[in-house]
Amino acid sequence: MERKKRIKYLVSILMILFMIGVAEWTGEKEIIFPEMAALTIGLWIVDKRVWRVKRSAIVWLMTLGAFAGVCIVRYSPLSLTANLSLAFVLAGLSLLCSRTTLIPLISACMLPVLLHTETWVYPISVFFLSLILVLGQRILERYDIRQPIAHSPSDRNWKKDLFRWMALLAFVFPISALAIGTENTCFILPPLIVTFTEFAHSKAGFRNRPVQIFFILVGAATLGTVLQWVGYTYLHLPETVVAFVVIGLLFLFFERSGKFFAPAGALALIPMIVPQEQLLWLPLQAAVGTALFLTVAMIVFQQCYKWNRAQLVYCITPSVLRNNRKKRNSNQ
């Protein structure tokens, strides 16, 4: 592994451990914002433009999203399903008005609603963590550790984009109602809704890999859950130690596979903040939610039923089988 890549992995792990360590030291769980793992992947590790957004906009968008989520919890008289939908709508409108594609904003806004977070510690934490990420990206680029990427605003077609967000909401609302009604709230973990939104975009680069994305997300949820249960609940290890192992193994997988998927980082840290009674069921519920969201995205938004047979077979074939077939063909 080259030196620059090692540095990016190291500072990313240190950033996540800093967040977990401060939360553990202060006793404030609300400081842990799992989406920071996704943001470190997109802003520090990957040398390409993951989201179309200015640095300054990252800070104020994420902070406003977190603030809006806490306000919904504190002041909205609506049901949990309606409040989750409201948070999703506010995040979508923010992205439209700012002409950005910072989809993790959805998680910043919906997470406090799902977990009933009422403390202002959460948006304050999101502000400082986002600020550190932005400053860290500038430093990495200044010292030629990360390749600088010029910002270009996202194209905006109000009619088309509004229709797409309304269509997304038309599925987020009933799936949320199903999850809450059956008391399986891990169906609608924010990283899964972020994935759903990303997949619904026709230009998503990973839209041809739904099976691979499914296993990555379920694997991340399982990894985080098992290590949280064994390391923290059973062995009583510090959460910083657990987080180090979780993120270290996840980054090792990304490096070996050569494929990065930011929401998996967030999903791997979710077990640290969910209620203890939900922990052991989290991987199964995450698997169901992932399958549900990916299926809707592929059929309704990507219209995979219109694809030719070769593209469809490629889409549903796990990457491991595709790679083995390529190796066999190259050896013949």
Image: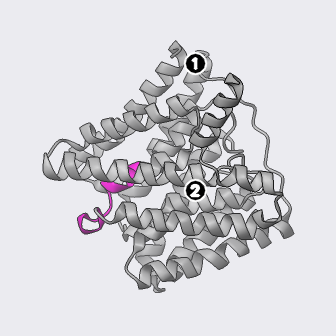
Badge 1 is on which residue? 145
Q: Which colour scheme is used?
A: one colour
Q: Do the residues under discs 1 and 2 have CB atoms within 8 angstroms?
A: no
**Quadrant in the picture for residue 304:** bottom right
Instruction: State the extent of the magenta-drawn residues as a range.
Output: 268-279
Most distant residue in the front direction: 332
Q: Where is residue 117 in the image (x, y as percent from the top left)?
A: 37, 67
Q: Is residue 274 left or right of residue 317?
A: left
**Viewer-proximal residue among 146 and 253:** 253
Q: How crowded is mark 2: few (under 14 residues within 10 Å), some or many (20 or more)?
A: many
Please state which of residues 186 and 134 is positioned toward the viewer in this rendering: 186
In the image, residue 319 lies in the stretch drawn in magenta: no
Q: Which residue is drawn at 68% across and 41% down?
A: 54
167 displayed left or right of 243 = right
Residue at image location 41% in from the left, 75% down from the top: 74
Quadrant of the image containing the C terminus = top right
| Relative depth, front residue between 304 and 71 | 304
